[in-house]
Image (cartoon, rainbow, N blue to C red):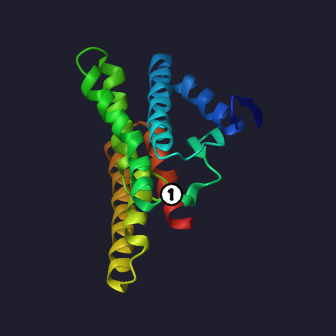
Amino acid sequence: MLEFVVRDYKIKLSFSFFAVLAVMFFIGDSFAVITALLCCFIHELGHMIMMHRFSVPINEIMLYGGGIKLKSETQKLYNKKSEIYILLAGAGVNLLCFFIFKGILTQFAYTSLILGLFNLLPYKYFDGGRVLKLIFEDSVSIAMNSVYKVIRSVLVLFTICVIIIMIYKGITNLSLIITLMYIVISEILC
């Protein structure tokens, strides 16, 4: 792991980040990979702007195989409403970029749209899943906890069906299949 400090930010670059990047450049179009990286950075910038808005300090920025993670030592000192705004800000910036650039920079606009929508999915490690958890976390009601578990279970089953259909239909988007398989495994095991 490479670590260095830029201003007040501790930047960490994991080996897995470089490994995933190398594989993406090897099997994909370089311009598409760079576009996707730019959209990821813009996504995180949305989170950073909202964190700044709510005075949540960012202590660490980590780039790893699964993406980019912002860390703050004071993560739980802000309220649930501001946490939801912070979580939704990344996808919000991606969607805003789509609407601004859809007629100008088409590949950038649609990559941004896909990234924003993908992050809104209610998987546990995505922004949408974390928002869903925040909404249901204070629920004392057994029924509300059951609804949360049912939503997650249906989503996992749906994802498994999508993987099976993609393989059956011969859709060979290897990175998407691997991503979906990773999501299912992490949802089941974690």
- Quarter holding the C terminus is bottom right
The answer to which quarter of the image holds residue 123 is bottom left
- Give amino acid for label 1: Tyr
Above-or-below relation of 181 to 61? below
Q: Measuring 45% from the left and 30% from the top, which residue is drawn there?
A: 42
Work out which residue is located at the far top of the displayed protein and give it.
104
Quickly name the residue at label 1.
78
Q: Measuring 47% from the left and 20% from the top, which residue is drawn there?
A: 29
Above-or-below relation of 81 to 112? below
Helix, strand or loop at label 1? It is: loop
* Number of marks in the rendered image: 1
The answer to which quarter of the image holds residue 92 is top left
The image shows residue 105 at horizontal and vertical percentages of: 31, 16
The image shows residue 1 at horizontal and vertical percentages of: 77, 38
Above-or-below relation of 147 to 60? below
Q: Is residue 2 left or right of residue 166?
A: right
Tell me if I can see residue 173 in this picture: yes
Foreground residue, 167 or 189? 189
Label 1, residues with CA under 10 Å away: few <14, some 14-19, many ≥20: few
The image shows residue 71 at horizontal and vertical percentages of: 61, 47
